[in-house]
Amino acid sequence: MIWDYQAQLARRLLLWGMLSAGAGAWLLSGQGELWRGFGLQALLWGLIDSVIALFSLRRAGTRLHQRVEVEESAREQASLRRILRINTWLDLMYIAGGAVLLILRGGQSSFAAGSGWGIILQGAFLLLFDALHACKIPDEYVVPDLGILDGPEHRAATLEGGPAGALLVHGFPGTPAELHTLGEALNRQGWTVRLMRLPGHGCGYRTLLQTRAPQWERAVLEELAVLRIMHKPVLLVGYSLGAGLSIPAAAQGRPDGLALLAPFWIDERWWLKALLFLVRPFLPTAVNPFNAKSINLAQFHAAIEDILPGFDLTAPRVQSAMREFRLPLIFLEQFRLVSRRVRRYARKIDIPVLVVQAVEDALVRQETTQKLLGWLVEKTVYTEVPGDHNLNQPAHPGYAEMERAVLKFARGILFTPE
């Protein structure tokens, strides 16, 4: 979270710098030497603060969407804390310098008096800014060990078959287990099936919040490249978030076919992007969704039952973990990043595509999928099935129809003449 915190700090400083510079320029254009002196300091300090903020924002931006190493994050936290503490002492010196100017020259020159007050104001703001942010530097949160997702079904696996290979990519926050039944069906059809595990998922859940969307996409590309070395043809199958990741992976890795099951992506409107840009500097770096009064634990338990059957939400260590849980907002932004990649690469796909949509899916809505279909190739096969988002589950009312559609599509890939 430290790089997101640095970015937040830089955005807030940039906002102050721009407001200060704008106010200073306006005051300089007016009458009165006092306000001209005050305005000059506001303009100069605002420009300096803006340059520093832009530099810091650029530096933090290079790390926002990279995997977080806890040890490196701790070193960065210590470094930022040290810098902010040094800055607080410098801020006190700025205030003292402004006061000295005001005392020595303020009585002789209105311009000097205005400059002195301007320096005092800028120093006071920076003192509060640096001191408060130094006290609130967040620690990197690592999910505690809850003794879950340790079974082999939650790890990557290969179902050996014929020369044709299929790569199956699960969703969020799923594991390879959620596509195992479909993988077995493809395997019976003769495919060698690779059930991959996205970084931070499954048995690696403790580091989930330290993973980022580029890492997920890169993992799919690497698995696809390995499969293509030994197998021909190659089919890429993605479910939910895995489908969203599979779109840019397919455009770059070029499998022979692509099956998208409930393909997740966010169709952000321009006004929503603008709103998020404006409010982001004022939001915290992390939240605890389990502290929200709107969270229904019964619904939450039902949602995770397929992933963690028998998981006891009332267990003391689970309750403690839920109270201490912190969800970084930068992690949530990874889903926006995946969506931008979907937009960028969907038009570049020129291989056969199957899209399966559940008609009652509240997460991946039909209108969103229809927009995606408009970007894909003309030879896309579209299938609707009954039920909600969890069409990967054998008990789902649309599972059997989804499986038939995937197997039929796979046969078409398997027997397509070169």
Image (tube, rainbow, N blue to C red):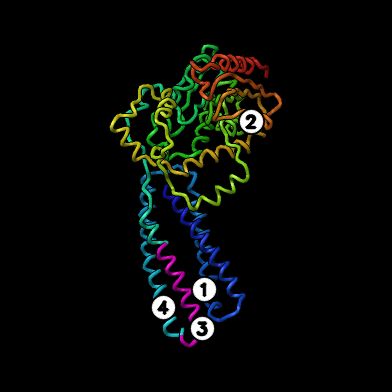
What is the crowding at mark 4: few (fewer than 14 residues within 10 Å), some, or many (at least 20)?
some
Q: Earlier in the sequence, mark 2 or mark 4?
A: 4
* Left or right: 354 in relation to 156: right
Q: To which residue does mark 1 refer?
A: 41
Q: Do tag 2 and tag 3 residues touch (Cβ < 8 Å)?
A: no
Structural distance between the alpha carbons of marks 2 and 3: 64 Å
Q: To which residue does mark 4 refer?
A: 99
Residue 349, located in which quarter of the rendered image? top right
Structural distance between the alpha carbons of marks 4 and 3: 14 Å
Q: Do tag 4 and tag 3 residues touch (Cβ < 8 Å)?
A: no
Q: Which residues are magenta?
A: 107-128
Residue 117 included in the magenta stretch of the image:
yes
Structural distance between the alpha carbons of marks 2 and 1: 53 Å
Q: Which residue is found at the position 55% from the left and 17% from the top?
A: 398
Q: Which image quarter holds the C terminus?
A: top right
Q: Do tag 3 and tag 1 residues touch (Cβ < 8 Å)?
A: no
Q: Earlier in the sequence, mark 3 or mark 1?
A: 1
Residue 63 vertical placement versus 221 (above, below): below
Q: Which mark is residue 367?
A: 2
Q: Secondary structure at mark 1?
A: helix
Query: Looking at the magenta stretch, what is its main secondary structure?
Result: helix
